[in-house]
Amino acid sequence: GAGVSQSPSNKVTEKGKDVELRCDPISGHTALYWYRQSLGQGLEFLIYFQGNSAPDKSGLPSDRFSAERTGGSVSTLTIQRTQQEDSAVYLCASSLVTSRASDEETQYFGPGTRLLVL
Amino acid sequence: AQSVTQLDSQVPVFEEAPVELRCNYSSSVSVYLFWYVQYPNQGLQLLLKYLSGSTLVKGINGFEAEFNKSQTSFHLRKPSVHISDTAEYFCAVSDSGTYKYIFGTGTRLKVLA
């Protein structure tokens, strides 16, 4: 079946511009995650959505970052007034988790959006 | 707050030799532990996970890891590596009370012929 898809695959923008990154999770997956992968920094948690619960936004680095998930499916990560330090690969993942410690506790990752802020 | 440490940023090893990639986490509360692998130019995929039960877990491609609660470790091992194992390996932990995952900085395994 179709995996997690992200668009665009690459984005080059100028400092100060806003960008929107899109994630299409696997159909039926209840949880959706955003991470940022910078060289030498590993994966940095940004935000996750779980079903109808309030999202956990504790990883967002500043108020320039926001995300929404419409209809429990597609998610958009928005970065306002981009800065050069925002340059990174932004990864989205989804999982089907109905309870902790189930065999469904697996995140499926998209290919990422490579963002370059000039 | 929970944190994950992967002390080795790069590990070179010859083909058919054994390898251990180290992972330590900070909090000893009930946790779920994972190893993900990222092959060159590919997305991350799950290698193995510890949720409960036996502390020795086996994953794909001959990898295994052992959960050691007293040492708060979840080291990844393979008795004999192949060239195709060259990739970046990420350890991750999730506390039982949250769906939030904390990833380590990754270990780049390079298998040499």
Image (cartoon, coloured by chain):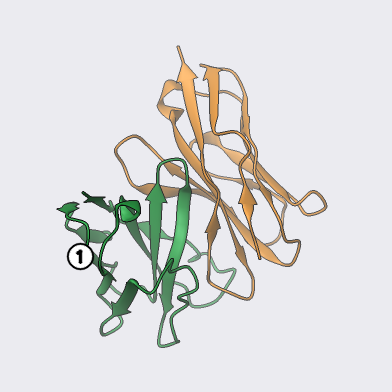
- Judge from the rendering whether residue B56 lies leftward or rightward of residue B12; answer left or right: right
Q: Quadrant of the C terminus of chain B?
A: top left
- Judge from the rendering whether residue B106 lies leftward or rightward of residue B5; answer left or right: left
Vertical comparison of A40 with A46: above or below: above
Q: Which chain is green?
A: A
| Residue A71 image offset from top left, x and y in percent | 26, 85
Amino acid carrying label 1: it is Val
Residue A61 quadrant: bottom left
| Residue A92 image offset from top left, x and y in percent | 34, 61
Vertical comparison of A68 with B84: above or below: below
| Residue B108 image offset from top left, x and y in percent | 48, 32
Which residue is at the front of the view, A101 or A8? A8
Residue at image point 75% right, 52% down: B72
Residue at image point 63% right, 57% down: B3
Residue at image point 67% right, 64% down: B31
Vertical comparison of A66 with B102: above or below: below
- Judge from the rendering whether residue B28 lies leftward or rightward of residue A98; answer left or right: right
Q: How many marks?
A: 1
The chain that hosts pointer 1 is A
Q: Residue furthest front?
A: A16
Q: Quadrant of the N terminus of chain B?
A: bottom right
Residue at image point 48% right, 36% down: B61
| Residue A115 image offset from top left, x and y in percent | 25, 52
Drawing shade for chain B: orange
Residue that label 1 marks: A19
Q: Residue furthest right?
A: B70
Mark 1 neighbour density, 10 Å: few (under 14) some (14–19) many (20 or more) = some
Which residue is at the front of the view, B104 or A4? B104
Asked if residue B60 can be seen in this view, the reply is no
Residue B78 quadrant: top right
Which residue is at the front of the view, B87 or A66? A66
